[in-house]
Amino acid sequence: MITLFLFFQSAAPASSVTVPEKMPAMLTLIYLAGLTLIVLLLLVSLFRHRRRGVITPLAVAEDLPKAVKRRLGSTSTNRGLRALRWVFVMLTLSVFGFHVYWTHYAAERNEKFQELSYKDLRNRRLSESTLRGWLLDRSGKLENALALYRRDSSGNIFRDYPMDQAMAQIFGSDRGDPGLERALFGIQSGALPEALEVAEGHTINIKGNTDVRLTIDRDLQQTAMDQLKGKHGAVVVLNPQTGEVLALYSEPSYRLKEVEDESTWIRLEANERDRPLVSRALGAYYIPGSTFKTVTMTAAFLAGEQNTQFTCSGGGFVAAPGANAIFDDGGAGEVHGRIGIDTAYEVSCNQYFAQMGVKLGAERLKVAAQLLGIGTYDTPTEALRGRKEPEIWNASSDAVKRALAPREATIVTGKGVTKYDLALMGYGQGYAGQMTPFQMALAAAAIANMDGRLMKPKIEFNRPPEMFKQVMTPQVAATLRSIMGRVTGGASGTARGVFAPVQAAGINTGGKTGTAQKVVPVYDAKTGEPKTRHRVEKDNKGNIIREYEETIMDEEHPRIDAWFLCIAPLERPQLAMAVIVEGGGYGSKSAAPIAAAIVMKAKDLGYFNSVRSQPSTRPGNRGQAPAKRQPRATATPMQ
């Protein structure tokens, strides 16, 4: 069935939909019926002629060999005609199938089509021919709308974004990769009524006119933006009990008004240093450093190795003969002695978790990683493919899942992994270097969930919670939360000083600091593009084999990224958070203060007051339905 291509009057209010006339639908059905009839007649004709015998003149039929008979009469004539008929049928079906693919399936499956669809003026005119629904934050209040329509002094209606920059990477624009707005309100083939439905007079509901209440808290989103101002990094805040995304922000960002101009969008896309169009929260890979010890600790408990003790010595840990010794950040002078997993996590001992990585082995690390949503691959080449992971989302449509799909975090667990590789992975280096802030927030959320479940993240408020995986038992989750509590409240906790004011305010938290070095390209200060050098390869005789441009890497000054994972409050966590600051140095100095500020803001908003009543909604709005909006006035054509 071909979807009927409908246009709605631009002057129609968003609360009503013009019912399409039946005549175009009837013509569509007649066209389909006629096309089907022609194809059937061609096929019948082909098979009917195929069954006929050889027709030759009677006078000579008896005396001629069979090979000669095949070349005479209607047989000789019709053979070429039948071949042409088959070619015509195949070409017709190919062209028809090609159009069906681009109409129904390309928008979902073809990434190149999605990237370039904004250039199709027909799609843009169709999507702009009717007013979209409003986007509300989790409170459901109209005054907290994140996307709405306003009327200017001339009477023109325009789409307004009160938090333009803060929400740009979530909402997306009409250019480039689809964002949440195009996913929720875009004109998709599956969203349009079928011709038969129109002809039969069925009621037609267009989703693009419906208001959508998001789980985003505009105050927490604004706080994340304010805390990252002037930095490069990302913040992800989840409700670990329900999977609700409370804040999701990446800096640098951009303004939706800016990219209405195509030249500005092209300039922003070319800026590879700042990458304002890319959500670092969802689409950027980082070396996780010590935050990955959270994954290793989870794997140790799942494997029953939580009581294992290791020695941290001044000589470091040598995983295999000839391998480099692994030390803690303080070098040979930092010695913790023989310790257990709780103390090792509190003081962030590299040697302990390197030894734990070796003891667990690839298979047991693989089990824990898969439960947390981390992809496991046999070879580094497979792990570097950067597959997107839409299936992790709890959403109303595949379009929403694709719009917010994070890059899959990966580790390598194949047979080629050595003990040294496992040691590096155990404390967040080596093959663990493909993590996103979103994935690390999920790792913290699994521990923060009271039942030890990893809930699918969701951004649509009215979606019921869905579980991704049962990661651990509630008892194990409680133990891991208490160990994370030692980082922010223990005597030797690496973030104790930063969270002292938070603890003084009566909020018990848990966390994990992380620091990771990463070699990055040298960028041009003006253009933001990586600097390159011209390379020429020659053979033994001096002949040029190939020439190419090589990106210059800053080997002497690696970037030191700062991480912090946080859960709060420990009694029943309402927040599970990941913070990354590129070039921020130690996690306790730059990333942890951002997390502490967000926790304090959540306290002011009343999140922790509702722990015992109903944690899934914002205090003051528990169970409250979205405010009912008065019907809008008839819209004038949008400018």
Image (cartoon, rainbow, N blue to C red):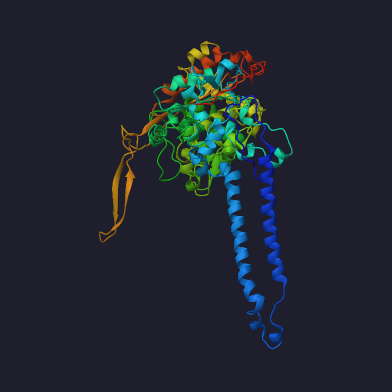
Specify the quadrant of the image occupied by residue 243: top right
Q: Which residue is nearer to you in this view: 629 or 308? A: 629
Say left or right for 113 vs 321: right
Say left or right for 94 vs 533: right
Could you tell me which residue is drawn at 53 percent across and 40 percent down?
388
Specify the quadrant of the image occupied by residue 538: bottom left
Q: Position of residue 602 (x, y in %)?
A: 55, 16
Q: Which residue is nearer to you in this view: 379 or 403? A: 403
Residue at the top extreme, as displayed: 505
Q: Which residue is nearer to you in this view: 25 or 335? A: 25
The reply to whether residue 306 is in sight is: no
Residue at the left extreme, as displayed: 542
Residue at the front extreme, as displayed: 23
Specify the quadrant of the image occupied by residue 6: top right
Could you tell me which residue is drawn at 69 percent across and 70 percent down?
50
Above or below: residue 514 compared with residue 3? above
Q: Which residue is nearer to you in this view: 445 or 492? A: 445
Q: Position of residue 376 (x, y in %)?
A: 55, 43
Q: Position of residue 3 (x, y in %)?
A: 64, 42
Q: Position of residue 22 (x, y in %)?
A: 69, 38
Q: How many marks can you see?
A: 0
The reply to whether residue 367 is in sight is: yes
